Image: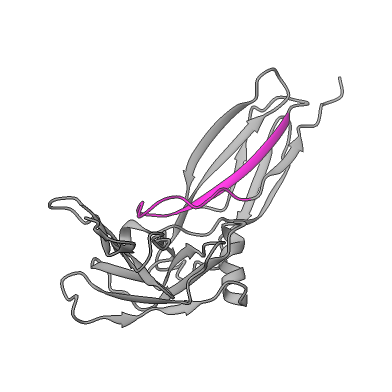
Amino acid sequence: MAAIVGSVWVTATLLMFVLGGQALDVLKLTATSRNPPSTPTVHCWCASYPNLTVCSWPEPSLSPPTHYVATYSERHRQKVTQLCHLIQPGSSFSDLISASSPSSERLWHCHLPNLKLLTSYIINVTAVYSDGSSSHLSSFMLEDIVKPDPPIDLRVSPHGIRSLLVEWSPPPSWANLNIFPLKYQILYQCKSRGTPKSVNLGPYESTKVVLKGLTQGGNYVFQVCAKELLGLGECSDWSSPVQITIPRTKS
């Protein structure tokens, strides 16, 4: 609800939840003017299960807040809150995270260390302005937000007649590869004949595969994504593309 008395914006709250589920989103703002402050749009993901969980939100380009406060707690122990370690835009750690998800916006991040498995958490990010504040409150379970960084060092090379060897390396940020292995999917597209056609292959548990029966002289583009072996969360963003043309054999 929102109430305006004279020129004063008192309070506005939007609540969304799923009965019996884990989803919870609360947007709340308070201000002393007719122009309500911008509410942070928070996105959380786990780039290395279970130890690297990060939440991010863009800083508004117009009228940025004076500061942010970010806290988190177990959903069923909300009175026990912990401060989230804030990472400012432009810091080395922020640049490293943003490099995996390029954006033209200035992104704030916060690191949530040592989260428990199979536990629902609530993150509360409050933007504090000179004339008010706005908050984003949402819940998540670690297993639902797993998203590795993209694989790196994708290599494609000829491997006999009409065959290619596709190789890649796991994302360096995935720290527990021996305990929590990854599986991979390959996206390739033939751009030589008429309308380009994309084919999604996998999952593969190894980091290389031989593709056979390809078209001689065909121009192919390859990308690969990574996902936790048991299917937790979602696949990473696609890796940088690699392009190759299948050699023609001499008649």
Is 55 a magenta residue? Answer: no
Kindly give the residue lying farthest to the right in the view shown: 250
Total labels drawn? 0
Q: Is residue 214 above or below residue 34?
A: above
Identify the magenta region.
219-239
Q: Residue at x 40, y 64 (%)?
A: 180
Q: Would you say residue 158 is visible in this rendering?
A: no
Name the spot of residue 44 as percent of width and height, x first: 40, 62
Asked if residue 4 is positioned above or below residue 96 in the image, the reply reads above
Q: Is residue 220 magenta?
A: yes
Could you tell me residue 77's position as x and y percent? Answer: 17, 76
Instruction: Give the residue displayed 44% in from the left and 73% down from the top.
Output: 110
Foreground: 239 or 98? 98
> In this rendering, would 59 be left or right of 78?
right
Up-down relation of residue 247 to residue 223 (above or below): above
Q: Position of residue 198 (x, y in %)?
A: 58, 30
Location of the N terminus (image quadrant) = bottom left
Image quarter for residue 242? Answer: top right
Residue furthest left in the image: 20
- State the image quarter where residue 15 is shown: bottom left
The front one of 166 and 53 is 53
Q: Nearer the viewer, residue 98 or 188?
A: 98
Res. 36 in view: yes
Left or right of residue 92, residue 25 in this image: left
At 21% from the left edge and 82% from the top edge, which residue is drawn? 80
Q: Is 59 on the left or on the right of 95, as rendered?
A: left
| Quadrant of residue 94 within the rendered picture | bottom right
